[in-house]
Amino acid sequence: MIATSTIMLGLSAAGLALSVKGNIDQADAQKDASDASKRAEDARKKQAALQYAREQRKIFRDAQAANAIGLSNITNAQAQFGSGLPGLYGQTSGALNQQSFDLAQNAGIGNEIFSANADVAMAQGRAATAQGWSSLGKDIYSSAGKIAQVGSTIWGGPKQDVGLYNWNPIANVNQKA
């Protein structure tokens, strides 16, 4: 009887240990996936910042080229002292400012998306950790009655199926054999 109880206790402990190891490995894997996702998101953010800088430089180059072409055309027409040149500069400056503003708005929206994605990744990491703890708790809870029954058998308690809620270790210890 004691040998059977010892085997049952050992198997219960082994099952619990394997369950705990599985939960820890699952949590580690989910953390690794979360870290990889964060690195990928950081790389996408750097790429977006680089693209923003390139687009901004292109806007300035295009504005300078438009000014240069306009100045050349006005000079060739010998109208550089008229109102055409200031009008040209005003037009290219306005276009430059509008394009820069549009680009800045896109960058702002992109940053909001990156921030939201980071929040999602953090929430998923917390959810995975909570799921691991929940699974571990369920495993311990489901093993508690069997472990209590084995302990009851070893120490001479009642010979019935002992559930988690009706098992009283103090009552079993105080009973006289």
Image: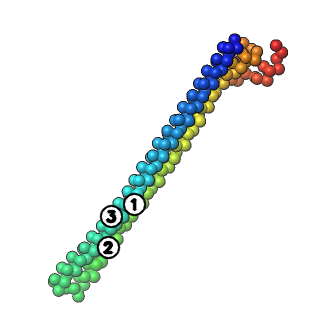
> Does label 3 or label 2 sit earlier along the sequence?
3
Q: Which mark is residue 49?
A: 1
User: Number of marks in the image?
Assistant: 3
**In this view, the mark in front (1 or 2):** 1
Image quadrant where residue 18 sits = top right
Image quadrant where residue 170 sits = top right
| Residue 84 visible in rendering | yes
> Does label 3 or label 1 sit earlier along the sequence?
1
Q: Nearer the viewer, residue 41 or 93?
A: 41
Marks 3 and 2, how far apart at CA: 17 Å
Q: Residue at x 78, y 19 (%)?
A: 172
**Secondary element type, mark 2:** helix
| Residue 142 visible in rendering | no
Q: Residue 160, how many percent across, how many down?
A: 70, 13
Q: Residue at x 70, y 14 (%)?
A: 2
Q: Is residue 137 left or right of residue 107?
A: right
Image quadrant where residue 162 sits = top right
Which residue is label 3 attached to?
55
> Does label 1 or label 2 sit earlier along the sequence?
1
**In this view, the mark in front (3 or 2):** 3
Which residue is label 2 attached to?
94
Disc 3 packing (10 Å; few <14; some 14–19; many ≥20)? some
**Secondary element type, mark 3:** helix
Q: Residue 49, how many percent across, how many down?
A: 39, 60
Q: Nearer the viewer, residue 114 or 102?
A: 114
Question: Which quarter of the rendered picture does the N terminus lie within?
Answer: top right
Q: Nearer the viewer, residue 78 or 54?
A: 54
Q: Residue 174, how many percent across, how many down?
A: 82, 20
Marks 3 and 1, how far apart at CA: 10 Å
